[in-house]
Amino acid sequence: MVLDVGVMGASGFAGAELVRILLRHPYVNLKAVTSAEHAGLPLSHLYPAFEGGSALSFVAHDDPVLSECAVVFLAVPHTAALNAAPQLVERGAVVIDLSADFRLDSADAYQQWYGVSHGRSDLLAMRAFGLPELFVQGLRDQADRFRRSQGCLVACAGCYPTATSLAAAPALRSGLVGEGIVVADAVSGVTGAGRRATDAAHFCAANESLRAYGVGGHRHLPEIEQILGLGGRLVFTPHLAPLSRGLLSTVTLPLATDEVIDAARLQRAYESFYRTSAFVSVLPAGVQPRTSDVVGTNRAQVAVALHPQARAIVATCAIDNLGKGAAGQAVQCANIVCGLPETAGLDLISTPA
Amino acid sequence: MVLDVGVMGASGFAGAELVRILLRHPYVNLKAVTSAEHAGLPLSHLYPAFEGGSALSFVAHDDPVLSECAVVFLAVPHTAALNAAPQLVERGAVVIDLSADFRLDSADAYQQWYGVSHGRSDLLAMRAFGLPELFVQGLRDQADRFRRSQGCLVACAGCYPTATSLAAAPALRSGLVGEGIVVADAVSGVTGAGRRATDAAHFCAANESLRAYGVGGHRHLPEIEQILGLGGRLVFTPHLAPLSRGLLSTVTLPLATDEVIDAARLQRAYESFYRTSAFVSVLPAGVQPRTSDVVGTNRAQVAVALHPQARAIVATCAIDNLGKGAAGQAVQCANIVCGLPETAGLDLISTPA
Amino acid sequence: MVLDVGVMGASGFAGAELVRILLRHPYVNLKAVTSAEHAGLPLSHLYPAFEGGSALSFVAHDDPVLSECAVVFLAVPHTAALNAAPQLVERGAVVIDLSADFRLDSADAYQQWYGVSHGRSDLLAMRAFGLPELFVQGLRDQADRFRRSQGCLVACAGCYPTATSLAAAPALRSGLVGEGIVVADAVSGVTGAGRRATDAAHFCAANESLRAYGVGGHRHLPEIEQILGLGGRLVFTPHLAPLSRGLLSTVTLPLATDEVIDAARLQRAYESFYRTSAFVSVLPAGVQPRTSDVVGTNRAQVAVALHPQARAIVATCAIDNLGKGAAGQAVQCANIVCGLPETAGLDLISTPA
Amino acid sequence: MVLDVGVMGASGFAGAELVRILLRHPYVNLKAVTSAEHAGLPLSHLYPAFEGGSALSFVAHDDPVLSECAVVFLAVPHTAALNAAPQLVERGAVVIDLSADFRLDSADAYQQWYGVSHGRSDLLAMRAFGLPELFVQGLRDQADRFRRSQGCLVACAGCYPTATSLAAAPALRSGLVGEGIVVADAVSGVTGAGRRATDAAHFCAANESLRAYGVGGHRHLPEIEQILGLGGRLVFTPHLAPLSRGLLSTVTLPLATDEVIDAARLQRAYESFYRTSAFVSVLPAGVQPRTSDVVGTNRAQVAVALHPQARAIVATCAIDNLGKGAAGQAVQCANIVCGLPETAGLDLISTPA
């Protein structure tokens, strides 16, 4: 089976990474890449990495070729996906949305955090949340729809929510976490801030520098709380560091009051949780993940440690923010929905140096 | 007044930065820089930054010239300072120790964390802790000793403890913090790991990478708990990011249960706390510090934010780990002890780009 | 056809990149990776990028499993390949040597530049030089040997020689170059200096720094002169810049005295030269290659410009020093020798950001 | 003596670095910093490095306070300096111009390279060229004017011309260079491309990447040819590398035909040339300069090597493009013109790590 596939919004970093992956995907025929701003331009003019590797040019968002695509990835900014998805789903396409538009379960929460009325609670109700390691059933339901030739919609998890949730979920789902604040301090490379040439994205502003941002009010906060069921008790602080790709989330969770757990049992709980996962590795006790070891892939590396004196669990997760945090995860979700091998087209091994 | 000064252990990163500062210090005559490994070698052979700027050569640790120095900075590894300090103090020198050997109040705690018997509780009792913004009285007591020509000893705070404590102290000392875990996630540049050529310090291991280390058991944990009076409730996780210098600590503290505080009052509490400080700036509400804005200086930039839903305070502090986190702070302490202007020889403005 | 393959010296950067490529190669069964120092250790302990992606462990160089390999890549230091290759060739293996041991045509030149007697002029005479875009016939001769089940030997070009020669060859072979000095100034990322933890490879030595090295006497000089037929008139100066991977060579060549050429004709000469190349792109006039656009791939991007006033040609070429400059080129050579598609297992598109 | 000083165009990288230097200059009272775009804004809002270190705000270019300044630095874009300088010189100010407007001796050449009619050949005739190590007499003439209270004008050399000329001048002025092409390949950090947020300056475009630019036609070409008297035979190719500050120029010069020189004599010629220089160090034979060893200072480090086989000299020079390549050099020139110690306010020692 080879699927005709389109990418709406291929000019951003996540969109371009998606194109790179799809061009090598054995079951995909990439038919169309769209860009409002760059329609008509060869892909390789904007991203010279495609020079000699692909002769595709951007077309407009409303180019008719999109209607021939069985699968459409939306890598457009939020609100644009809200506009584009309904029609695509209705005509029976598989829509894999990388934007934030269908992530929050509640239309009210969407309006609160994104300042826009949602208006498609029906789609929110039928869509799957795209974080396969934690929400596989929803994706299987979409796979049923796909087999019945019904339109499908997947709202892929954001980059910070993916890393933070993969780190925290085994502890939370094992009942090891008690009351009190849960703290997620995460650090991202600069691709996470997007392709726009801003003062903050200038090499000389980001290089040799560290800073926090969005303190107390980042839009990924409600998404992480929703995934982990942490209503109101998460403190999430994102940071920027001078690297292009890579995201590390460090999550500190209070141990349940009556819990008598040793580090070995905690380690086993994590290993057991991800035992069947194709993409998530739990590192041996004492070893911490490095983002450089997952860059360019769809992998996540997770470690967990116990802090006995303060009675806390410290879990860390490293991903490529454009890989497992965006384009890779989107392809993984599409693979599941379309009945392909989950790892098809996805790299498992990063460049070693 | 010009003081004759020596630096023991000038071949490490902190020692070399100390030399750079002292060479420009208007009240200092830098007489001797020592190195066990590099004795006899010109400073500029190991650090070509000194080429054309200083003709000093390293001498051995036991070179007699040290005995002519009124002030001796110890930038040697821990345990080496423990050996060197007593004799220097006894002969009446001002000893500014950058190592960890005299930081912990308790000799037992030292043995627990550093695996070495301390044996000089008398010196622990008389020494000052070198973090002037939080412990100025101890330094003033040493200044009295200096005026009476008695030996002085200052144990300068470590890099992580400095940034973490400057971020957290105003909240804690204002009584705004309640019960529960306090989380400090801090990120450092690679100079923090020292000058030794290790696999982890290889450019290609550290570049384009993020990782946590020392999870659950870093030696700066007891030091921070001691400074902040946080016995047993601190979770401190240090991280490495791909930059040479710079350290950012993000501290999350639970708000006191009955506290009704708004962000403006919190901001004022922080501004008030550092109002008279020559080196610490509290940034306007909504602005976060960047490490690049303090590199090369003895400054700290601090920000504080309120997280109303989770009832938490998020305080951040950026320093140069070799500046306010090591060499700068040591010179600041020496200035206070020796009755010099607190800012003498210390830069206040980083390179803007 | 699936070939059993081994990598001798898989613990260095080039060796590890080779392993990454071979693990994804559709016609390869990677049977053995050897390391003198790390035998017994899982590959993923040294390179956590393989965690979850490969369960291979290093074996000793003399492990019998190597004798089962139809193709053996030598990624060992120079002189070690000289020792290992003869026996492998004699037993009929395809030997793809990434070291310098069989690159120079003359055993005397080898002794002069590497300080070791060569002693295998017979192998030098039969081996092919591994830079397929410029020396394809030698590789085809090896392919004939492979079809006849005879041992094969390919001496892959070094990283600087590859980029420099791909930039300069079209001008030289078109007869456009006159007398006088040819200057190649090339800049490499730090992986080019190897995996050894040295002072110069320390993050804080290489970061935010530029420097030349090996001025006047780098071992790649005679290799480039040999490839390009530039006996004695090449000035080659390599430089290090703060990036992990990537190599850019800028070559300045004097225009032939009587040559009346315009930029358009020069551009066409370059485009024509690489028209059928699967891996080399000549960029449009006025566009310069960036190393980031070829990293992780076996591609080279080339540009050429005319400097009419000084009557010079300036040609540039960007490669990944570990890709087209080492592991990628080795696989390309193996593909040709073994009768596989030239691009099998090799990436054509770098990560766009 | 304390001079009232103003900086026109303080919002760019060179302007901001100038402000940093002038704020610490013992003979300077920095009265005014101007910016067309940011007038009214505190300096620290645009450059948080000044937070806590300076309370200055930008004023408009035509603010009357400028008329009170004895010395005015012009860090405005080219053509803007052409407009501003005449009036300032006429009212008797010392004008130190960092732009390109008065660098070229010939108004025709200016029009050719900058596309603007110059119209002030009179000022070109009276101005000094600001590269003190090579053109000190012109600066002394301006010093005479200053003592007579006449207006002064210095056109400071550009960053590439400074490094390239400091590397090449001793060889050329010693008569060691023969006929043929002279090649200068130079690499700069990204501050060299200015503060504007462009696609090329985006962190993710510049990071982990190397590229040449302006091949065959960079505006610094005629400036270097003028300084070195190399009419028409220089090939100058600038490159960008992923660092913020630092510039390395590698210059290859053909040895004179009849010259019988050994490396030791060449080395002595260089050492002799810069013997009395406060800012230029000639490194020992075999040692190459690193940009990181001069960043933040006004120093240049130079090395020279002989390439006997190709009969060429390879000279290298490392500077901080914003230091000796811009702001530092401007202050050095001002010091000379105003009769201050040449090194006043200028750092000689970079941060060692």
Image (tube, coloured by chain):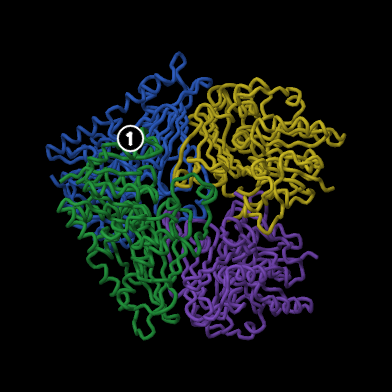
Chain colours: A yellow, B blue, C purple, D green
Q: Where is residue D330 in the image (x, y as percent from the top left)?
A: 29, 53
| Position of C344 relative to D32 (above/below) | below
The image quarter containing residue A336 is: top right
Residue B195 seen in the current view? yes
State whether residue C348 is above or below residue C342.
Answer: above
In the image, D241 versus B226, the foreground residue is D241
Residue B152 pos. (x, y %): 20, 40
Is C156 or D307 nearer to us in this picture?
Answer: D307
Taking the spot 27% from the left edge, 48% from the top edge, the residue there is B21
Chain of residue at mark 1: D
Q: Determine which residue is flagged by label 1.
A: D57
Q: Residue at x 58, y 64 (%)?
A: C303
Q: What is the x, y in percent for residue B259?
A: 44, 15
Residue A144 image point, x, y percent = 84, 34
Taking the image as shown, residue C38 lies to the left or right of residue B128, namely right
Looking at the rendered structure, the kind of residue marked 1 is Ser
The secondary structure type at the circle numbered 1 is: loop
Q: Can residue A299 be seen in this view?
A: no
Q: At 66% across and 37% down in the image, what residue appears? A: A76
Question: Who is closer to the viewer here, A223 or C145?
Answer: A223
Mark 1 crowdedness (10 Å alpha carbons): few <14, some 14-19, many ≥20: some
Residue at image location 68% in from the left, 50% down from the top: A20
In-image side of B240 versus D231 (left or right):
right
Q: Specify whether C279 is left or right of D211.
A: right
Up-down relation of residue D282 to residue B315 (above or below): below
